[in-house]
Amino acid sequence: MIEPWRILRRHLTIFSRTFWTNTMFNFFEPFLYLTAMGYGLGAFVQEMEGISYMEYIAPGIVASSAMFAATFECTYGSFVRLHYQKTFHAILAGPVTVRDIIIAEALFGMIKCVVFGAVILLVIAVMGQVRSSLALLIPLFLILPGLFFSLMAVTYTCLAPNIDYFNYYITLFVTPLYLFGGVFFPLTGMPVWAQKLAWFNPLSHSVEVCRALALGQPAWPTIGEHVLWFFIGSALLLAPPIHLMRRRLIQ
């Protein structure tokens, strides 16, 4: 099991060289959403579930930013390494398996998820939108959705014939997760069927946990259910990308 860590170290070495460029890009977009929605729309929304609208959406922005970080890394980033740079082909020339490559990709996406989630968490803390020190647990929790979103994204990457196909994944799949994940409004206001469907939305589970920890209102049994959801989901998602990538790399 040492090979995935060697591949991951290679990814982290490259990431360290472009850290500020990557971080600033992923910082400004969530910050703009937070200020525009929080101060703009928030001026017309007095309260949301007993708290200010800014306090309501801020933890959701943390969760969604983490989702996008893992998603973009394991779609565009992984595809560039696969198709254009031929990095995976070169790695396979050594004592490494396709399974090692997939695990390393998922771990790298997970790390970027945690890093960018932590950056946005720091921003909302500075803006005074964190009520509890339990928010310090959010980066630790983001390991789970980070792994899930990374595996989900790399699975699609294995199927994408060219880079333009990621427009479909982002627009038709990830964006609906974002819009109907409980970031901007409570899902309880939607029809019953939509609320039940939202249970399958991984972002909604991440948002619920981040919001509970940021506000210092954790219902630990419920958080345990969300954690279990990600554990089971990640376990189910591990095998497909390994199989698909093996077919793609080893003819």
Image (cartoon, grey):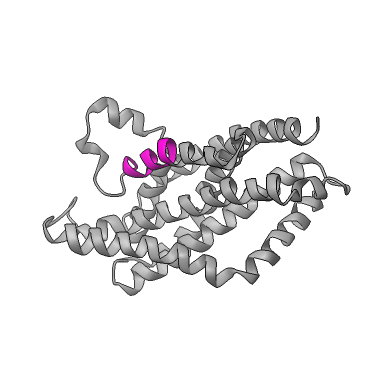
Image quarter where the C terminus lies is top right
Q: In this view, does 33 lie to the left or right of 27?
A: left
Q: Can residue 124 be found in the magenta stretch?
A: no
**130 w.r.t. 159: above or below:** below
Q: Can residue 176 be found in the magenta stretch?
A: yes
Identified at 34% across, 42% down, the residue is 181
**128 w.r.t. 146: above or below:** below
Q: What count of labels does the image hold?
A: 0
Let me know if residue 5 appears in the view. yes
Choose between 128 and 40: the one closer to the eye: 40
Identified at 54% across, 72% down, the residue is 20
The picture quadrant where one finds residue 157 is top right
Identified at 55% across, 39% down, the residue is 152
Identified at 43% across, 55% down, the residue is 65
Q: In this view, does 209 lie to the left or right of 162?
A: left
Residue 202 percent location from the top left of the image: 44, 40
Choose between 211 and 92: the one closer to the eye: 92
Q: In this view, does 60 lie to the left or right of 49?
A: right
Residue 64 percent location from the top left of the image: 40, 51
Start-end of magenta stretch: 171-181
**78 w.r.t. 134: above or below:** above
Q: Is residue 37 left or right of residue 102?
A: left
Choose between 15 and 233: the one closer to the eye: 15
The picture quadrant where one finds residue 61 is bottom left
Residue 250 percent location from the top left of the image: 80, 33
Residue 138 percent location from the top left of the image: 45, 59
Let me know if residue 221 appears in the view. no
By secondary structure, the bulk of the magenta-drawn segment is best described as helix
Choose between 134 and 235: the one closer to the eye: 235
Q: Which residue lies furthest to the top in this view?
A: 193
Q: Which residue lies furthest to the bottom in this view?
A: 126
